[in-house]
């Protein structure tokens, strides 16, 4: 009897240990935050952010602009501007939407090749700081 | 309500020990848990249950009801019901049916056995492994069903004397079943509590401790903010325990950060570089689940984060933010 139970138990362990690693790539490498930057028209730039649960509730978005860029307005308004490094930052709190955009209006067309956008957040499982870079998309 | 009021003495109530024992056992609570919650000895709880102390202080009764998660009325001794011998009074249905069925049991059984010996042996052999599997899984469940609880304190290694210092305690359970708990934090000497979230159940002045009593499922966050005098110097030492009603872990020490030293750096400035970095501000928002808690000045934190740094001005008791 105990041999049967042990056999059953071993069978279960074997099945689980075979199936579980197969699902790991999907679980551990699935990025919870993804972002892209694109332009519409001459002066309008968008940073689109997509979140997959378990997504972080707080994000910091940092945009480094080419020198000489002149921002007329951003939506939502940026939280911090560093004129020395020509960068702006947003602190986004209580993020609940799974997809949203930050809109920038500049005086002249922004050179996306010289623009970088980084998104920083804390990994919900490990608590470590994670940084991703927005992908440039040509429209 | 059965209140016995003795002139000049405390308000006493009559409790039903049998009900108390039944509720406690139904909820899987130990006498030790109840004793800790009510702040009496386990002997006293035992005497209550055995009806050796049928009258207790109302104050203890309220605590007892709270620990048992029932209303006070539910543990009070009700007036005994008059036992009627009236034959017309209805009897429980079960008894009636049993009585009615009893004559039927005299029906003669067929002389031939229900199963042949071979069939009986076959069925027995079939059922033995099934019972084995059930017992086997029950044995495994004994380890897995009991919740595994982890409790961790997060407090900054540095703070400024006279300024609020938040302490975060995170409890996590391996199951989503509600678990009754008592969380007790002993406050460091020289510290006073400014606020707590959620509200504490009790504060002990004697040993300068605060206590939460309640239920958690999956996880819960407790925050309290303390402060010292402006002239405090040295290190605050933290310790606390968590008692769980249904766990094989018994009493759990609160793990995590255990001390915080007075200095010139804001508590959120973990690396003491006179700046609040992106990581540091994200950590605070994650710890508070992006909620605003009393005594945590998030506006000041953001202001420092937005600036290029800060300097604490002890004479003015304020921060100068560098632009």
Image (tube, coloured by chain):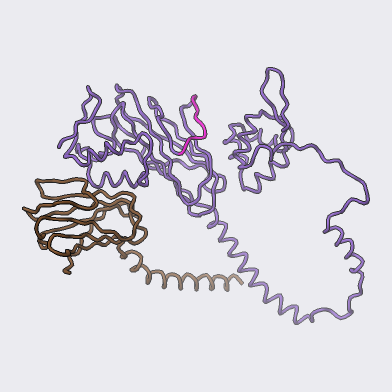
Chain colours: A brown, B purple
Question: Which residue is rendered at x = 70% and y = 30% of the image?
Answer: B13
Which residue is drawn at the image coordinates 25% and 39% (left, top)?
B269
Residue A123 magenta: no
Question: How many marks on residues?
Answer: 0
Residue at image x 34%, y 38%? B155
User: What residue sits 22% from the left and 41% below the top?
Assistant: B305
Please give left or right for residue B50 compared with residue B261 in the image. Answer: right
Whether residue B112 is visible: yes
**Magenta region: which residues?**
B198-206
* Most common secondary structure along the magenta stretch: loop
Say whether residue B165 is left or right of residue B248: left
- Where residue A101 sits: x, y (%)? 25, 58
Please tell me whether residue B109 is drawn above or below residue B201 in the rendered image: below
Image coords of residue B293 (percent x, y): 38, 38
Tell me if residue B202 is in the magenta stretch: yes
The image quadrant that residue B46 belongs to is top right
Q: From the image, which quarter does the C terminus of chain B lie in?
A: top left
Q: Which of A9 and B184 is in front in this view?
A: B184
Q: Position of residue B51 (x, y in %)?
A: 74, 35
Q: Name the side, left or right, on which A51 lies relative to B86.
A: left
Could you say which is closer to the camera, residue B114 or residue A9? B114
Q: In this view, does B81 lie above or below B7?
A: below
């Amino acid at each position: 009897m105990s041999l049967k139970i042990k056999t059953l138990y071993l069978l279960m362990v074997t099945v689980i240990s075979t199936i579980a690693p197969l699902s790991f790539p999907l679980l551990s490498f699935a990025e919870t935050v993804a972002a892209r930057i694109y332009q519409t028209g001459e002066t309008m730039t968008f940073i689109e952010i997509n979140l997959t649960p378990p997504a972080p509730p707080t994000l910091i978005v940092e945009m480094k602009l080419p020198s000489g860029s002149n921002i007329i307005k951003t939506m939502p308004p940026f939280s911090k501007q560093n004129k020395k490094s020509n960068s702006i930052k947003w602190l986004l709190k209580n993020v609940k939407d799974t997809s949203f955009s930050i809109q920038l209006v500049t005086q002249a067309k922004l050179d996306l090749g010289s623009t970088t956008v980084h998104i920083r957040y804390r990994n919900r499982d490990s608590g470590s700081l994670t940084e991703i870079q927005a992908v440039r998309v040509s429209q | 309500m059965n209140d016995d009021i003795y002139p000049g003495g405390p308000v006493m109530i009559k409790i039903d020990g049998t009900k108390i024992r039944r509720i406690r056992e139904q909820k899987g609570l130990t006498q030790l848990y109840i004793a800790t919650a009510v702040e009496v000895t386990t002997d006293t709880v035992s005497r209550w249950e055995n009806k050796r102390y049928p009258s207790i202080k109302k104050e203890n009764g309220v605590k007892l009801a709270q620990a048992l998660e029932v209303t006070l009325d539910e543990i009070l001794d009700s007036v005994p019901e008059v036992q009627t011998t009236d034959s017309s009074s209805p009897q429980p249905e079960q008894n009636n049916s049993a009585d009615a069925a009893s004559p039927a049991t005299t029906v003669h059984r067929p002389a031939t056995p229900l199963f042949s010996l071979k069939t009986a042996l076959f069925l027995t052999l079939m059922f033995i492994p099934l019972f084995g599997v059930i017992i086997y899984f029950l044995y495994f469940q004994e380890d897995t069903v009991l919740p595994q609880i982890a409790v961790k304190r997060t407090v900054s290694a540095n703070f400024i004397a006279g300024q609020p210092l938040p302490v975060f305690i995170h409890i996590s359970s391996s199951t989503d079943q509600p678990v009754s708990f008592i969380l007790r934090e002993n406050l460091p000497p020289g510290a006073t509590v400014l606020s707590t979230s959620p509200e504490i159940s009790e504060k002990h002045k004697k040993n300068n401790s605060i206590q939460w009593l309640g239920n958690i499922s999956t996880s819960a966050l407790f925050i309290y903010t303390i402060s010292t005098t402006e002239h405090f110097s040295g290190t605050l030492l933290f310790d606390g325990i968590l008692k769980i009603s249904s766990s094989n872990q018994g009493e759990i020490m609160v793990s995590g950060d255990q001390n915080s030293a007075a200095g010139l750096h804001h508590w959120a400035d973990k690396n003491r570089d006179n700046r609040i970095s992106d990581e540091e501000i994200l950590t605070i928002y994650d710890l508070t689940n992006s909620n605003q808690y009393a005594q945590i000045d998030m506006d000041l934190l953001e202001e420092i984060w937005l600036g290029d740094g800060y300097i604490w001005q002890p004479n003015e008791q304020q921060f100068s933010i560098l632009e």
